[in-house]
Image: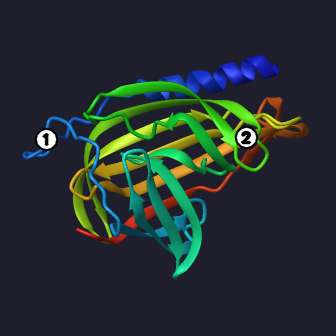
Amino acid sequence: MTMNRFLFCMAAAVFMGACAAPSTYVPADAPASAAAPQLKAGDYWEYAVHDGWTGLPRGIYRYEVSRVDAEAVLVNLTNDGRLLDTLVYAPGWNGRELPLTNTQRFRYQPIYPAYAYPLAPGKRWKTVLRSTDVATGRSYATHVAGKVVGWERIRVPAGEFDALKVERSVFAGNMEGSLSQEEITETDWYVPSVRRAVRTSANSQHFDNSRGGSDGDGEYPLRVRGDYLISELVGYSK
């Protein structure tokens, strides 16, 4: 199989996934749509994180808002009290400067479209944005396609919630030498009353054209899987 055909098949698979039937579950008290959340300094959310491949725990991670203004929301990410990073969002959890799943830290222009408000079942969006590596200054064209699948009833350690399931397919654009761009899948279960997702799932893969692998009837570049992390809410400020 040629590389062009291989990439076409990958794109077709993503497209077919986007055509999946939406959820038919609707909570009795569900709002017609969900607006962007209102946040303030001191708000926090804590998550138990585990490896989606092995099931092994990765610890408890806390996201705490340190500052909010009209342009940005600064969030301190800590693990067992140790500061790991300060993430910069636009209002509504759309990224301004933070790492992309399984890649480096980027500054986004326009903002990274994790959500397109107001959120409602069936809503879709597509954006091409410029992702600039804050360490090297190199920029890439990143493609993001998102959709609100619908409502789901979900149980996590913090309780049981009616959540809007949001899926994103991302092509990072960060090709380097023999390495293809990162192909990322992100899923959030967003709860309007919690003002954040109560469960997230994120994983990615890229291909190394300098190394061979085999898959049934043909030769392919080597597929390299990134981390597959699942986070579930254990506590939050109300």
Location of residue 140 with respect to 15 vertically, above or below: below
Amino acid type at mark 1: Pro
Residue mark closest to the camera, 1 vs 2: 1
Q: Secondary structure at mark 1?
A: loop
Q: Nearer the viewer, residue 5 or 149?
A: 149
Q: CA distance from mark 1 to mark 2?
A: 39 Å
Within-10-Å neighbours for mark 2: few <14, some 14–19, many 20+:
many
Which of the pair 99/231 is nearer the observer?
A: 99
In depth, the one of 72 and 224 nearer the eye is 72
**Left or right: 163, with 76 as reference point:** left
Q: Residue furthest bottom?
A: 80
**Label 2 SS:** strand
- Is 151 situated left or right of 184 in this image? left
Q: Quadrant of the C terminus?
A: bottom left
Residue 99 placed where, x, y %?
61, 51
| Residue 146 placement (x, y as % from top left) | 44, 32
Q: Residue furthest right?
A: 210
Residue kind at label 2, given as amino acid type: His
Q: Is residue 129 above or below residue 44?
A: above
| Residue highlighted by disc 1 | 31
Q: Is residue 65 left or right of residue 220?
A: left
Judging by the rendered image, the residue that carries numbered circle 2 is 206
Give the numbered dot on residue 147. none
Marks 1 and 2, the one that precedes in the sequence: 1
Colour mapping used in the image? rainbow
